[in-house]
Image: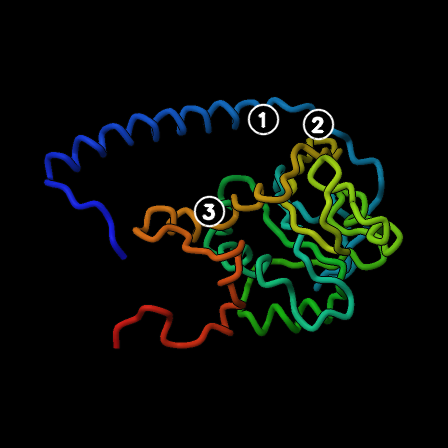
């Protein structure tokens, strides 16, 4: 790997220029976050019932006593042998976050269309502790535009990421946020799709700091289920 090499003084000069751009990005990020929180909310009037390890539970029940709920729309359809590798990459970050989110009035879960028995088989294989429920039998995934019928897929485009999506497929990733008021009313406050789901991928934030960056040939071509990486990792020195 060849790269420009400079003196320490020249490096500091270049780094200070970059720092200005980084601060501008931070300020923009804060501005967008304020605008996100200012979005109007949509009241959820439909009674979604999910299969959970504790039995059937409504969307309101999933808040687990807190006022805020974050949902990972995990790509895992009925009959799949395992969950999507990219969604699994996202989920690998959840357990570490959950202890902090729970103590900040936020519950975070995953939702998939696969039956609960298939979800649990895969969750146990991956060693995850977070709560993962099944929307099998209710229209939650379809209503939130992360699952699509065979008829929709057959058209050659789908309504995903707030517009026409030229790629097709029955399952797509997303992250959604909900709020429950003191009266028990539930509101949809935000959703992100496409590259917006990178908010869950803390590994990418660290790779962006590393000398080679993301170092991807095509999208997330390097990502595997964490129990499927070949050891030692590429580039490791034995």
Give residue 178's mark.
Answer: none
Of 162 and 142, nearer the camera is 162
Q: Which residue is mark 1?
A: 37
Label located before the other in sequence (3 or 2): 2
* Residue 43 position by quadrant: top right
Left or right of 133, for residue 214: left
Q: Which residue is mark 2?
A: 41
Of 83 and 168, nearer the camera is 168
Left or right of 43, for residue 75: left
Q: Secondary structure at mark 2?
A: loop
Q: Secondary structure at mark 1?
A: helix
Which is more foreground, mark 3 or mark 2?
A: 2
Q: What is the C-alpha distance between the residues marked 1 and 2?
A: 10 Å
Q: Would you say the residues marked 3 and 1 are in contact, meaning their CB atoms lie under 8 Å apart?
A: no
Rendered residue at 61%/22% (across/down): 38
Label located before the other in sequence (3 or 1): 1
């Amino acid at each position: 790997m060849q790269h420009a090499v400079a003196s320490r003084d020249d490096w500091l000069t270049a780094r200070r220029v970059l720092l200005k751009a980084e601060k501008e990005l931070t300020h923009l990020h804060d501005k967008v976050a304020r605008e996100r929180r200012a979005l109007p909310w949509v009241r959820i009037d439909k009674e979604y019932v999910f299969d959970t390890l504790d039995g059937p539970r409504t969307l309101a029940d999933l808040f687990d006593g807190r006022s805020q709920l974050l949902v990972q729309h995990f790509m895992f359809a009925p009959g799949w042998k395992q969950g999507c590798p990219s969604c699994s990459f996202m989920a690998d970050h959840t357990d570490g976050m959950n202890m902090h989110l729970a103590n900040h009035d936020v519950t975070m879960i995953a939702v998939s269309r696969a039956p609960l028995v298939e979800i649990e088989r895969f969750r146990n294989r991956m060693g995850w502790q977070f709560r993962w429920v099944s929307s099998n039998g209710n229209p939650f995934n379809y209503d939130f535009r992360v699952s699509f019928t065979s008829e929709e897929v057959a058209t050659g485009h789908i309504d995903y990421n707030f517009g026409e999506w030229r790629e097709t497929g029955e399952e797509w990733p997303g992250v959604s946020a909900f709020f429950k008021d003191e009266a028990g009313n539930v509101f949809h406050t935000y959703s992100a799709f496409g590259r917006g789901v990178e908010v869950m991928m803390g590994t990418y934030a660290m790779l962006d700091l590393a000398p080679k960056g993301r170092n991807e040939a095509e999208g997330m071509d390097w990502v595997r289920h964490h129990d499927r990486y070949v050891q030692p990792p590429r580039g490791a020195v034995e």
